[in-house]
């Protein structure tokens, strides 16, 4: 008897799997057609490419591909003249110098070097390699892999620009080296995603968020999406002549946007299992540290990785925390009810605990992996639910959503600040940020001052909230016909749907070229439903019940949501052309979840890219704190863009127990 954990994410056509296969088959087996294919090799990487490898592949997969040793390019290494070496490097001069040092002279470190660069190599570096006559005979391959991004999800990647807000939106000149370098490297890494899709390379129709308002009032911040789009377009256009079999016409769509499209996402509490893990637990990326009790000895500390290789994580990550808890409880009871040995270790037929499950692992070793996974997630869900109760997040989350939907105002905010004296400063700040976005007029004069005094926030936090009065461009309205409140947050979902239907206005989102019919081949058939007639004004952010104990029969579709990747691999065969969305300045986990849901809805694989995925560890970084100190200077605040400022506010707060995850 086995437990139903759902299907693993093994579809060969999924974005992340294509990238992984390129590494395992093309990079790690460069001589697969030769007689030497059975020989073990050494893999040498720099600090950046080792991260690319780490996100795409597991160590066991690398070993299975014939790699016996993984080395750091810049660390001292033992000579292995009888072995071949695979170099996976960024095309940087310092890397090429180290490479030539390894392979030149009478006694090279390795027999042959198979060299792969993560992005196009400059001509001057190619000449630099050719000029060393002793190295040329020892090179088995010299190729451009065009893999210079981190695949953080089956349908998500980042370019590793955690400080993009500071570098692109900070108080620096447009021609500054940092600004230009960031645009250049970000564009290069985005472009490599389209060259990385083996046998189906993509040439994107590139669109971007246009500056709003009068051109005379346009700031450099408004121009960032256009400048990035221009840089990406220049690179992918060159691919047509430099990469064999690269498409000559657009085959997919790329939409470049930045944080101003959704100002609420970075601060509102998100109630999915994935978001709450990163919001409430102390995690290092995808790693979670926990303790396992040992009979007669000290608890053992273990490390779990919450990612696509865990089928139970795949099943639960996009579910509401209440629904995830129910599913785990059902799985546990189902396992116990169908296994007599497990029943013997339960407490007289009562509820089984995680300690009981640990005993079951010892009694039933054939189920150890499955039971350990179940035990892990039961512990995580239990801890999250405990934090929800201790922090009073149920009431806080409800008020946040009521504010967004126009169902609450000053009275309710004042009431909760008075009644919940133990509310953490972080949660008070997040609540007031949302309130200031929705009702900016409530912070005029001394109104905001009195509210902040009631919240008893530190002086620095009070200054942060005061700065919110400079925010502009929040698209809010009240219907004169019904009085229904409407907020244009959650714009990512709307933009993707309009793009898929061919309804995204070119004036607001211009294209770098006229999109070909191939790029929108699936657009007209992806969704046959037209816009509703006379739609009622409503928020484009889905209301999520922030109730931790919620029935699975709730009308909230999130409760029954499961990963798109749980569907059979054949499902992808019916999908239309891909849509890529790139978020400058950091994406949220709710936005990553949105692309999974829309993929199945529209029958098109949607890939979310960003400069970073914003998790709590990033929010407390020293760099973002310095960004905030710079941003609140009076001479610069007048130019700052609303959502970028919002993002900085979110980042700078020390969210030790409560992170920032969007609620959609």
Image (cartoon, grey):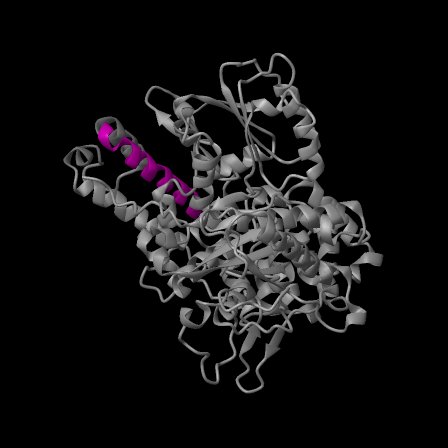
For the magenta stretch, what is the residue range?
365-389
Give above or below for 523 relative to 204: below
- Nearest the viewer among 35 and 22 is 35
State whether residue 3 is above or below residue 95: below
Q: Is residue 437 left or right of residue 372?
A: right
- Horizontal and vertical percent for residue 430? 61, 55
Residue 38 in picture, x, y percent from top left: 39, 23
Of residue 33 and residue 554, the one placed in the foreground of this image is 33
Q: Quadrant of residue 333?
A: top left
**Residue drawn at 56 percent across, 66 percent down:** 491
- The answer to whether residue 279 of the structure is visible from this angle is yes
The residue depicted at 47 percent of the width and 43 percent of the height is 19
Residue 77, image quadrant: top right
**Residue 410 to residue 305: above or below:** below
Nearest the camera: 385 or 648?
648
- Specify whether residue 383 is painted magenta: yes
Going by the picture, which residue comes out furthest to the left? 340
Quadrant of residue 416 in the image? Answer: bottom right
Q: What residue is shown at x 54% (from left), y 65% (from top)?
A: 490
Dominant secondary-structure state across the stretch colored magenta: helix
In percent of width and height, residue 364 lies at 22, 29
Is residue 386 at all visible to an observer of this figure? no
Name the residue located 43 percent from the left edge and 67 percent from the top edge. 522
Q: Where does the N terminus fall, quadrant-wise? A: top left
Q: Is residue 631 magenta?
A: no
């Amino acid at each position: 008897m086995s437990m139903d954990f759902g299907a693993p994410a093994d579809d060969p056509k999924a974005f992340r799997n294509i990238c992984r296969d390129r590494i395992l088959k093309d990079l790690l087996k460069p001589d697969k057609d030769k007689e030497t294919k059975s020989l073990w090799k050494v893999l040498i990487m720099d600090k950046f490419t080792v991260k690319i490898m780490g996100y795409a592949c597991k160590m066991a997969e690398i070993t299975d591909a014939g790699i016996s040793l993984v080395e750091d390019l810049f660390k001292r290494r033992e000579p292995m003249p009888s072995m071949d070496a695979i170099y996976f490097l960024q095309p940087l001069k310092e890397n090429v110098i180290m490479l030539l040092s390894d392979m030149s002279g009478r006694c090279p470190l390795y027999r042959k070097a198979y060299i792969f660069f993560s992005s196009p190599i400059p001509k001057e570096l190619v000449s630099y390699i050719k000029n060393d006559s002793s190295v040329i005979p020892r090179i088995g391959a010299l190729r451009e892999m065009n893999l210079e991004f981190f695949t953080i999800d089956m349908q998500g990647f980042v370019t590793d620009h955690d400080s993009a807000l500071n570098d692109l939106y900070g108080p620096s000149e447009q021609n500054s080296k940092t600004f230009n370098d960031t645009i250049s490297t970000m564009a290069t890494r985005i472009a490599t995603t389209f060259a990385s899709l083996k046998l189906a390379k993509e040439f994107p129709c590139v669109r971007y968020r246009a500056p709003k308002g009068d051109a005379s009032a346009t700031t450099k911040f408004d121009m960032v999406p256009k400048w990035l789009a221009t840089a990406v377009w220049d690179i992918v256009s060159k691919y047509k002549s430099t990469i064999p079999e690269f498409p000559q016409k657009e085959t997919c769509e790329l939409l470049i946007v930045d944080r101003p499209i959704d100002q609420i996402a970075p601060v509102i509490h998100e109630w999915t299992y994935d978001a709450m893990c990163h919001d409430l637990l102390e995690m290092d990326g995808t790693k979670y540290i926990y303790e396992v009790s040992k009979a007669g000895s000290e608890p053992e500390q273990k490390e779990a990785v919450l990612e696509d290789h865990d089928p139970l994580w795949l099943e639960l990550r996009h579910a509401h925390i209440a629904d995830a808890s129910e599913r785990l409880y059902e799985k546990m009871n189902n396992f116990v009810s169908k296994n007599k040995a497990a029943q013997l270790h339960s407490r007289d037929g009562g509820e089984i605990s995680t300690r009981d499950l640990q005993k079951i692992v010892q009694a039933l070793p054939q189920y150890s992996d499955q039971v350990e996974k179940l035990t892990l997630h039961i512990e995580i869900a239990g801890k999250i639910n405990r934090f929800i109760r201790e922090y009073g997040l149920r009431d806080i989350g409800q008020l946040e959503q009521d504010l967004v939907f126009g169902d609450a105002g000053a009275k309710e905010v004042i009431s909760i600040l008075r009644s919940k004296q133990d509310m953490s400063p972080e949660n008070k700040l997040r609540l007031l940020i949302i309130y200031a976005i929705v009702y900016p007029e409530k912070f005029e004069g001394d109104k905001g001052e009195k509210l902040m005094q009631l919240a008893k926030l530190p002086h620095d936090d009070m200054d942060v909230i005061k700065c919110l009065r400079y925010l502009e461009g929040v698209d809010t309205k009240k219907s004169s016909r019904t009085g229904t409140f409407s907020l244009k947050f959650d714009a990512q979902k709307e933009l993707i749907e309009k793009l898929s239907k061919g309804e995204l206005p070119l004036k607001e989102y211009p294209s770098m070229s006229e999109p070909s019919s191939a790029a929108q081949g699936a657009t007209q058939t992806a969704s046959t439903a037209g816009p509703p007639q006379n739609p009622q004004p409503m928020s484009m952010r889905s209301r999520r019940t922030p109730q931790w104990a919620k029935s699975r029969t709730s009308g909230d579709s999130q409760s029954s949501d499961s990963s798109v990747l749980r569907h059979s691999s054949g499902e992808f065969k019916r999908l239309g052309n891909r849509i890529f969305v790139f978020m400058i300045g950091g994406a949220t986990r709710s936005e990553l979840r949105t692309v999974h849901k829309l993929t199945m809805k529209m029958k098109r694989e949607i890939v979310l890219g960003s400069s970073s995925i914003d998790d709590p560890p990033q929010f407390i970084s020293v760099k973002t704190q310095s960004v905030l100190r710079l941003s609140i200077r009076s001479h610069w605040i007048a130019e700052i863009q609303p959502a970028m400022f919002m993002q900085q506010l979110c980042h700078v707060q020390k969210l030790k127990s409560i992170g920032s995850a969007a609620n959609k």
